[in-house]
Amino acid sequence: MDHTSGGEGLPRALALTLASALVWGVAHFVAGRRVAGGVLLALYLAVAGAFAGAATVYRSDLPTLAVQPDMLQRLTAALVALGLLWMFVVVWSYLVLRPVSMTGGARSLGAGAVAVMCLAVAVPAAWSAHKSYVARDALTSIFRTGSENGRHVDADDPFDGQPRVNILLIGGDAAENRTGVRTDSMTVASVNTKTGDTVLLSLPRNLENVPFPPGPARDRFPYGFTGDGGGTPGLLNEVYQYAEEHPDLVPGVAKNHRGPELLKATIAGVLGLRVDYYILVDMFGFADIVDAMGGVRMKVDQPIPYGLEGAVLEPGYRTLSGKEALWYGRSRTNSSDYVRMGRQKCLMRAIAEQADPHTVLTSFDKLAAAAKRTLSTDIPQELLPALMKLSNKVKNGAKINSLQFVPPLIYTGSPDFDRIRKLTSEAINSDPRQVSSHPTTSASASPGVSPSETDDPQDGGNGTPKVPSKPVSLDSSCPS
């Protein structure tokens, strides 16, 4: 070590050490170690160039890289290595420049100052490495690889040449006082893989006599699902749990996967639409996600009963907590299943709009932990980069329209499945920007009643609520 080069005193050595911590190699150049200084400066410029390129030229690719577990693993290792290397540079720079002769107090002061510099380097490197590790852990916990779930994805053609990808969004209600899972929210998001334009096709939970796909399930219920007595009257929201409890209906499928597989196939048949993947969200865990975001800002357009003690979410703009958002999306008091289906779509829209990068970054650990507890899916890891690109299109200008198969458009007690399939075909094949500009009117009808039995003050005078038969833009149907 060249102790003589730092002989002018400790302050100078620490100042140059700090300069070398900011730009590698400064201390070595001052000490006359040009080769070492040149190598360190070249490494520094390479690292700085990599970060600059990521922030500018490759910025648009960062979201897709962030959902690749292998890339996150490499990033974690690289960040740890970078932090260690940076601390080594700081210590080495000080050793090159420190004075030959120092008192015990000066020695302690110098060591403490260098330790602080090392800490200043270590903290952001460790924080970044931790975030990338947490992200990888969440991804691998929620999403299996294609080889694990038998869903091979071609990186060059991730959607297999299909013009649309159809994902079943399921809200599962696994309450403490209930055995199993009831899927009280079922919506197929049909997304145009080129433009991101999306149609949300929502089926009511109390749809009856749904036809099962060919196979053991249809053999048991050839005329549609009717359940097994009073405990399971045969509603659509019972299919998931019924399949879990009757493995013979979905032979060869493992536990906790039987329900999603049969529900996907059943809804595909009801809509006449291929269903590619599903995402199940536990409704109580959903509240944790909202809380991790810091709440969700909504316009409440009418009083919503909240809790079990008579509280009310008053109309107006307000930031809902997780529990409040859950009640907003689930409450049926003085309302109906069909009204709350509309609120759920508006809640989904608000969360998607407000989950910006800053919110995600500042609450990342909480969001990742909540997602692991709350989400399950059969979307393979390899498809995530393509879905991330597609979600950016959806968020940045694509049209999101909604079509709800609710009374009197479709009567749940005696559904016209041919009409459902016809309306679905028209919805996904029409120009998404040529949609109804009128929001769905709140339907207070009970399931299965006839139009003449419906008494709605907004029904146009003939007793039948106005429910569009074409998709409605969420921009017009959600309070704003």
Image (cartoon, grey):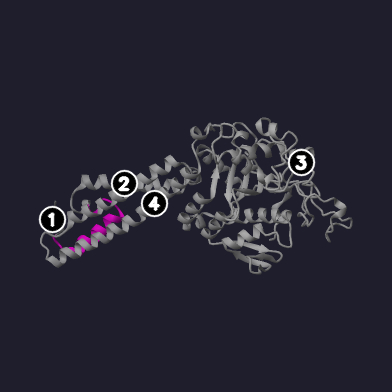
Q: Quadrant of the C terminus?
A: bottom right
Q: Is residue 476 visible?
A: no
Q: Local crowd at mark 3 within 10 Å, few (<14), some, or many (≥20)?
A: many
Q: Is residue 11 visible?
A: yes
User: 336 or 23: which is nearer to us?
Assistant: 336
Instruction: Give the x, y percent position of residue 314.
Output: 67, 69
On screen, 319 above or below 395?
below
Could you tell me the amino acid type at mark 3? Answer: Ile
Disc on the earlier residue, 2 or 3: 2
Q: Do tag 2 and tag 3 residues touch (Cβ < 8 Å)?
A: no
The image quadrant of residue 210 is top right
Q: Which residue is mark 2?
A: 81
User: 97 or 235: which is nearer to us?
Assistant: 235
Local secondary structure at mark 4: helix
User: 385 or 411: which is nearer to us?
Assistant: 411
Q: Which residue is mark 1?
A: 3
Q: Which residue is mark 4?
A: 130
Q: Do tag 2 and tag 1 residues touch (Cβ < 8 Å)?
A: no
Instruction: Give the x, y percent position of residue 393.
Output: 60, 45
Could you tell me the amino acid type at mark 4? Answer: His
Q: Is residue 351 magenta?
A: no
Distance of label 2 from label 1 (alpha carbons): 28 Å
Q: Local crowd at mark 2 within 10 Å, few (<14), some, or many (≥20)?
A: few
